[in-house]
Image (cartoon, rainbow, N blue to C red):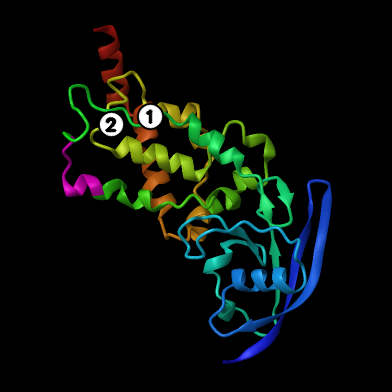
Amino acid sequence: MSTYLAHFKVWRGDPDGGALQDYDVEVNDGEVVLDIIHRLQATQAQDLAVRWNCKAGKCGSCSAEINGRPRLLCMTRMSVFGREDVITVTPMRAFPVIRDLVTDVSFNYAKAREIPAFVPPEGLKPGEYRMTQDDVERSQEFRKCIECFLCQDTCHVVRDHEENKAAFAGPRFLMRIAELDMHPLDAAAEAGLDRKVSAQDEHGLGYCNITKCCTEVCPEHIKITDNALIPLKERVVDRKYDPLVWLGAKIRRRA
């Protein structure tokens, strides 16, 4: 087994401030960055704070930034770096630091609570829902989300503009709205909720300028922009600006 020393710069600090600290850490074949962070904790920095759980790329806990790119520590192999590379590990920039590599992601849970839930069709009980496989496949991709919040972290609307957070749900939760809007059994419209209008007026869909940075960092390879956000934007435009849709809505209101 091949072993070498890698040079790491790891951000250490708390809400009052911090700085990068240098460490030389042993690396073995087949290891990921989280292995090295654990070895660093065991040998040199026992008080280093890092959030993790499954180490299998399915819990979304170990989100951080490696050389400036939002990644999962457990899914970033050391083999993608050269042995002479300096590897910088910092907390997610879009969220407040708690300590070291751990950030406060409660913003995301607050946004999740703002998204109206699935509305069951009237007259159908759980267990009586029926959908075709084509219907299932439309939104099944979005269900792969592990809520690592890397897409939220890399989205420049959130990352670079703190003032936008109040009005913008971010790609993860706009994708959730798109998923519900595509659901053939969602009866939100019948209950008086237009998810397309809600996405635009209440959750900031218009802030998204489809740079696809969220898609690029998704560890589940969900095509967030192409398959969720752009189709949702298209439906919003149809709803607001298509003259036939506008006329139909006027007629229905008068009726």
In the rendered image, is residue 40 in sight? yes
Which-is-in-front pick, marks 1 and 2? Answer: 2
Give the position of the C terminus as an image quadrant: top left
Q: Mark 1 points at which residue?
A: 195
Q: Using a 10 Å C-alpha cutoff, classify the residue at mark 1 as few (fewer than 14 neighbours), some (14 to 19) or many (20 or more).
A: many
Vertical position of residue 144 compared to residue 196: above or below: below
Q: Determine which residue is flagged by label 2.
A: 186
Q: Position of residue 228 (x, y in %)?
A: 39, 46
Residue at image position (65%, 54%) is: 92
Dividing the picture into quadrants, the one containing residue 246 is top left
Secondary structure of the residue carrying tag 2 is loop
Residue 76 vertical position relative to residue 212 in the rendered view, above or below: below
Residue at the spot 26% in from the left edge and 13% down from the top edge: 252
Residue 242 lies, with reference to residue 140, above or below; the image says above
Q: In this view, does 220 lie above or below 239?
A: below
Left/right of residue 143 with respect to residue 255 in the rendered view:
right
Tell me what residue is drawn at x 33 percent, y 29 percent. Answer: 242
Q: In this view, does 17 lie to the left or right of 235?
A: right
Which mark identifies residue 254? none
Q: Which residue lies furthest to the top in this view?
A: 254
Q: Which of the two discs, 1 and 2, labels the residue nearer the N terminus?
A: 2
Q: Which of 238 and 223 is in front in this view?
A: 223
Q: What element carries label 1?
A: helix
Amino acid at pointer 1: Arg
The region drawn magenta spans 129-136
Residue 133 forms part of the magenta stretch: yes
Q: Mark 1 and 2 residues: CB-CB less than 8 Å, in contact?
A: yes
Residue type at mark 2: give it. Answer: Asp
